[in-house]
Each structure stands twice: as C-alpha cells, then as structure tokens.
Image (spheres, coloured by chain):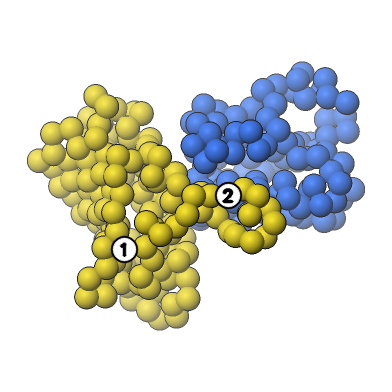
Chain colours: A blue, B yellow
C-alpha cells in the first residue's frame, strides 16, 4: 500500500494506493490517526480512487477515523470510491454512514 | 468436480496470499468475475476472523506451528470453501448484525466481516469437532 498526502483548499486529502486488508490496514490506521493527532486538520478526505479492494479491516479503520475526527469537531469523508468498494460499504450498511464525494469538484463545492 | 487445497500460516501476512490463491484458482475454473470477487472477499473475511479471533489469544509458538487449511471445491454451479483451523472456537453464527451506533459508542467492535460473508455467500456454517474448527462457505454461482 502506498499513501500520499496533499492539500486541497481547507481539506487534507489522504490518497491510498492498493488493496486494503488485514495485512496492511495498520498503515492506513496509522496514517489517519497521525494526521488527526499531529496536525490541525479540519477536514480529512480519504481518496480511494486507487483502491480496488477493501475488506472489513479497512472498514474498521475508516469507522475509527471518522469517530476520532468527529470527536475533535472535524469533518471526515471518502472520495472516488470504486464500484466494488462502494458495494462492500453498502453490504456493510455503511454507505449512508460516511459522507462520500464522487469528485473534487463536488468536494470543493462544500463550504 | 474440481478440488484444491492449500495450507497458510496463521499470520496477517498470509491474507494477500489467501486472496491470490482463491482468485487464481476460481479464475482457472472459469468462475465469473462477479462471483469470484464475492468469494475472494468472503475467504479474506473468514481467514481474517480465524487469525484475529481463533488465534488472537493464542501464544506465538502455537500460532507458528498451526496452519489454516483452505479447500476450494467446485461441483456444477456451486463453489464450497472450507477453512480448517485448531484455534479457539469462534462461532460466526452467534455474531449479531453490525450496529454502527454501538461501534461508535465503543460498546462493540467490528461485526462487519461476518455480515459481509453472510451477504456475499449463499450459506455459511461453522463446526467445531475434536478441537478442529471448520468454517464452511457455499456460493451458488450466478452463471
């Protein structure tokens, strides 16, 4: 898994590359938690355009990230979900739990 | 009928190997992409559960000596997956549906994996006999 960070206006965008499963989910969790704890992040967006596969370990990391971010009064969202990952979130009944953006244009339209 | 079997170490680093093994086998058997994706994810979740729950409290030496045996069988339009391990008994049938409110309140962790398996497969069963756990997943193929 490869993880890159970039800024987009007020948003911190965490780009994830590759499958997310139990083997590497620790890297994703650490990246999310480090950002939330060490930086003044008001809006964290997880960009999943390069994630073709995610299992429930990944779901757990995203749920934990959203919980931590909300406790700090920040925003947490997902962006660019591939079909299979979106289907998996739907099966887990979490598609309405997360704020999901289809594009950066849609994200930037958010105040 | 097609049958293949492979043993995996009880280690998180084996999860990508489980996925790769199931994917390449089912692909060779001509299983459709849609069904294949479902079965790969279900196998990943089953192996993840075994590593986290059946072997979570188990000491390192036993983890290293034990294995997870994964059998794939295809007969007509049904794929059967059997995962055998000798960890602590973990009955998936008793895992309640995930409840995101309880998760957020810190009153419960996970539950999504078992729910995913139930959603993806036609049937899941669990047996524990003579210290051996068997997780059995059945998928009736759509094509």
**Residue B139, image x, y percentages:** 27, 39
Question: Image quarter for residue B41?
Answer: top left
Q: Label 1's element? A: strand
State left or right for residue B45 relative to residue B73: right
Residue B132 visible? The answer is yes
Q: Label 2's element? A: loop
Disc 1 crowd rating (10 Å Cα; few below 14, some 14-19, many 20+) is many
Looking at the image, is B56 positioned above or below residue B31?
A: below
**Residue A61, image x, y percentages:** 63, 51
Looking at the image, is A65 positioned above or below residue B65?
A: above
Q: Name the residue that disc number 1 marks.
A: B68
Q: Report how far apart the C-alphas of labels 2 and 1 lie in the structure.
A: 29 Å
Question: In this view, which residue lies farthest toward the left?
Answer: B1
**Residue A28, image x, y percentages:** 64, 50
Instruction: Give the residue drawn at x 81%, y 39%.
Output: A75
Looking at the image, is B52 positioned above or below residue A96?
A: below
Q: Which of marks 2 and 1 is in front?
A: 2
Instruction: Give the residue drawn at x 44%, y 77%.
Output: B58
| Chain name for mark 2 | B
| Chain name for mark 1 | B
Where is the N terminus of chain B found, in terms of image quarters?
top left
Q: Which of marks 2 and 1 is nearer the N terminus?
A: 1
Residue A55 or residue B66, whichever sits in front = A55
Mark linked to residue B99 = 2
Disc 2 crowd rating (10 Å Cα; few below 14, some 14-19, many 20+) is some
Question: Image quarter for residue B83?
Answer: bottom left
Count of marks placed on residues: 2
**Residue B71, image x, y percentages:** 22, 53
């Amino acid at each position: 898994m490869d993880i890159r960070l970039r800024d987009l206006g007020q948003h911190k965008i965490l780009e994830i590359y590759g499958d997310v499963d139990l083997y590497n989910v620790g890297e994703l969790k650490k990246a999310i938690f480090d950002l939330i704890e060490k930086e003044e992040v008001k809006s964290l967006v997880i960009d999943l355009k390069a994630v073709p596969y995610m299992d429930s370990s990944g779901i757990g990391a995203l749920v934990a990230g959203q919980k931590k971010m909300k406790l700090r009064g920040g925003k947490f969202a997902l962006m660019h979900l591939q079909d299979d990952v979106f289907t998996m979130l739907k099966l887990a009944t979490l598609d309405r739990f997360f704020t999901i953006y289809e594009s950066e244009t849609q994200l930037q339209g958010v105040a | 009928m097609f049958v293949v079997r492979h043993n995996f170490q009880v280690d998180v680093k084996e999860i990508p190997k489980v996925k790769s093994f199931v994917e390449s086998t089912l692909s060779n058997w001509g299983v459709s992409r849609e069904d294949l994706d479902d079965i790969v994810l279900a196998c990943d979740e089953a192996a993840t559960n075994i590593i986290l729950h059946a072997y979570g409290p188990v000491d390192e030496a036993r983890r290293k000596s034990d294995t997870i045996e994964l059998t794939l069988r295809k007969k007509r339009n049904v794929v059967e997956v059997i995962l055998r391990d000798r960890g602590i008994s973990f009955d998936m049938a008793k895992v309640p549906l995930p409840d995101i409110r309880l998760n957020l309140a810190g009153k419960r962790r996970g539950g999504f994996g078992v729910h995913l398996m139930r959603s993806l497969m036609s049937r899941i069963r669990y047996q524990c006999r003579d210290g051996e756990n068997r997780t059995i997943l059945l998928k009736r193929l759509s094509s």
